[in-house]
Image: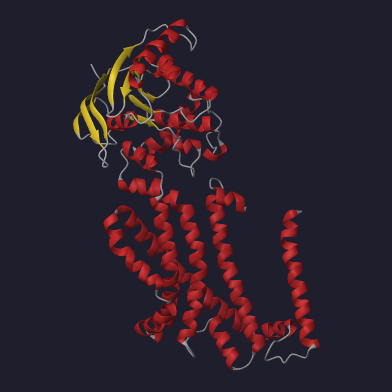
């Protein structure tokens, strides 16, 4: 049973760079998977191909759902619209009736801790709050698959940790499937149940690490141990 | 307090200049056909009030008609450009040619083609031609500089081309479009004045024609009054468009926040 499956995916950029070679992985429903690697290893390209925003040169992508939420590294909000209208965008585009869409967007904003900020404009919000609106927008349409492209990379560590905890809580509450692109070992070790380690030039997966379930917090021995395992797998990247 | 000063200081300068002007004209006994005193201009303005107001209304309406036509045509073409690179590459050079050809040079041709019996159409067409390019280029720029990720995201949620245009690209192009509209609005007036000059006697009925006519009759005070009204028209157009910009952008765009 898989929700998302990439098989033998290759991608070459117009300038000749081989971005991805023979990328193959499966994600089962309900999984929280990190795609981890150094900058420029093709993780974002892989994610865009997984979302269907980019077509692979060869290989196949199978998605068991068309209900996808996507979060970019930048909040990517509409500056002319308030938080509610931003969170409502996917529903508006799908033609969901206005009152129903408003209720869903309101609920999504409340889930990310932004109740009361419905009418705030992006420029009135902090970086972390903007990212929360972006998360709320991705969740408003209740997607089965949530794709996140280094969503917290531009935030300070305190905000990043808070948003990570929220994401984990939301994942546990809603049971959607997450593919999380990151270059942070500690983030992937704490948040995800499985880590796919990527190697650059050409981008490919070099390790598929299942993490134990008892990583109750960032400093739990199991989390530290997971970091060691992931770092060792990454070590082969730099060696 | 700062606001009051912003208004009071320019007014004080105006009072000072007008006072100096009034004094200089009487002190050096400058002939009225060279430089009339402000008081003489005020008298000429009062004496010709209704005809000057009619001329003002004519100039303003023709300018706004031309501007409105240019706005509709420019935005429509910019939208077409944003949908097809091929159309843009094919047509953009012609828009540039239209812009770099001095409007005074095409004015006589347009007047002949449209005909003097439809003089207001000809005048607004000339005003529109000159206003067209700044609006086109800024609208095109605005539509093109839409956040790519936002477009991708909309596509991911199944948005159609027109939904993306309407919900994402057009709102995102507004700041740039409004800048182009401010430039276009002001130069539409320049185009209208040029067109009135080119149209010549007996046909044009706006402020520019009043300037030519008063000059010919050596009614320099009336000329000054018409000139002042023309400057006022330009200010009115600019202020109106700035107000529109502020109303549309005040909640979200930096430019409207700093100018407010």
Is B146 placed left or right of B204 in the picture? left
Q: Quick check: can you spot residue A193?
A: no
User: From the viewer's perspective, is residue A82 above or below residue A70?
Assistant: below
Q: Position of residue A199 (x, y in %)?
A: 31, 24
Q: Nearer the viewer, residue B139 or A174?
A: B139
Residue B100 percent coordinates (x, y): 40, 72
Q: Residue A175 in the image: state x and y as whole percent.
A: 37, 17
| Residue found at x 27% / y 42% | A15
In the picture, measured across the screen, residue B92 lies left or right of residue A187, that is: left
Q: Which residue is found at the position 26% from the left and 57% from the top?
A: B86
Residue A50 placement: quadrant: top left
What's the image's color scheme?
A: secondary structure
Total residue callouts: 0
Give residue B118's position: percent from left, percent from top. Answer: 40, 82
Looking at the image, the residue that sits furthest to the bottom is B217
Say above or below: A39 vs A173: below
Residue at image point 36% right, 81% down: B114
Q: Is residue B26 visible?
A: yes
Q: Is residue A59 above or below residue B111?
A: above
Quarter occupied by residue B98: bottom left
Q: Residue at x 36, y 58 (%)?
A: B78
């Amino acid at each position: 049973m898989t929700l998302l499956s990439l098989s033998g995916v290759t991608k070459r950029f117009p300038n000749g760079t081989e971005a991805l070679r023979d990328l193959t992985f499966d994600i089962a429903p309900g999984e929280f998977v990190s795609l981890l690697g150094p900058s420029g290893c093709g993780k974002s390209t892989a994610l865009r191909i997984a979302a269907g925003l980019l077509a692979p040169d060869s290989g196949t992508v199978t998605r068991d759902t068309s209900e996808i939420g996507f979060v970019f590294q930048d909040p990517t909000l509409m500056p002319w619209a308030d938080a509610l209208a931003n969170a409502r965008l996917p529903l508006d585009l799908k033609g969901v009736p206005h009152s129903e869409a408003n209720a869903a967007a309101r609920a999504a904003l409340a889930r990310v801790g932004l109740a009361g900020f419905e009418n705030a404009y992006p420029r009135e919000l902090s970086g972390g709050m903007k990212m929360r609106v972006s998360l709320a927008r991705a969740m408003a349409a209740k997607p089965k698959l949530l794709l996140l492209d280094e969503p917290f990379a531009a935030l300070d560590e305190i905000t990043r940790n808070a948003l990570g905890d929220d994401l984990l809580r939301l994942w546990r509450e809603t049971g959607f499937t997450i593919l999380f692109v990151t270059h942070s070992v500690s983030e992937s070790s704490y948040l995800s149940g499985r880590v796919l380690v990527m190697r650059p030039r050409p981008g490919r997966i070099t390790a598929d690490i299942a993490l134990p379930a008892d990583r109750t917090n960032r400093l739990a021995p199991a989390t530290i141990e997971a970091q060691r395992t992931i770092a060792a797998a990454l070590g082969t990247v730099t060696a | 307090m700062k606001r009051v000063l912003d208004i009071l200081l320019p007014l004080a300068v105006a009072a000072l200049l007008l006072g100096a002007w009034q004094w200089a004209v009487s002190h050096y006994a400058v002939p009225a056909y060279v430089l009339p005193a402000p008081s003489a201009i005020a008298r000429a303005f009062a004496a010709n009030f209704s005809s000057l107001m009619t001329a003002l209304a004519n100039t303003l309406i023709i300018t706004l008609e031309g501007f409105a036509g240019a706005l509709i045509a420019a935005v429509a073409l910019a939208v077409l450009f944003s949908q097809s690179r091929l159309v843009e590459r094919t047509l953009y050079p012609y828009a540039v040619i239209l812009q770099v050809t001095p409007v005074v040079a095409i004015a006589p041709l347009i007047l002949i083609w449209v005909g003097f019996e439809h003089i207001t159409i000809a005048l607004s067409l000339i005003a529109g031609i000159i206003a067209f390019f700044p609006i086109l280029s800024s609208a095109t720029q605005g539509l093109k500089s839409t956040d790519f990720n936002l477009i991708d995201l909309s596509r991911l949620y199944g948005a159609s081309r027109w939904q993306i245009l309407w919900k994402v690209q057009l709102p995102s192009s507004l700041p740039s479009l409004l800048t182009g509209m401010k430039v276009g609005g002001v130069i539409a007036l320049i185009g209208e004045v040029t067109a009135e000059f080119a149209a010549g006697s007996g046909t044009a009925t706006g402020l520019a024609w009043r300037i030519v006519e008063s000059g010919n009759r050596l009614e320099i005070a009336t000329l000054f009054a018409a000139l002042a009204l023309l400057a006022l028209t330009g200010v009115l157009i600019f202020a109106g468009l700035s107000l529109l910009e502020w109303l549309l952008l005040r909640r979200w765009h930096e430019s409207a926040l700093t100018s407010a």
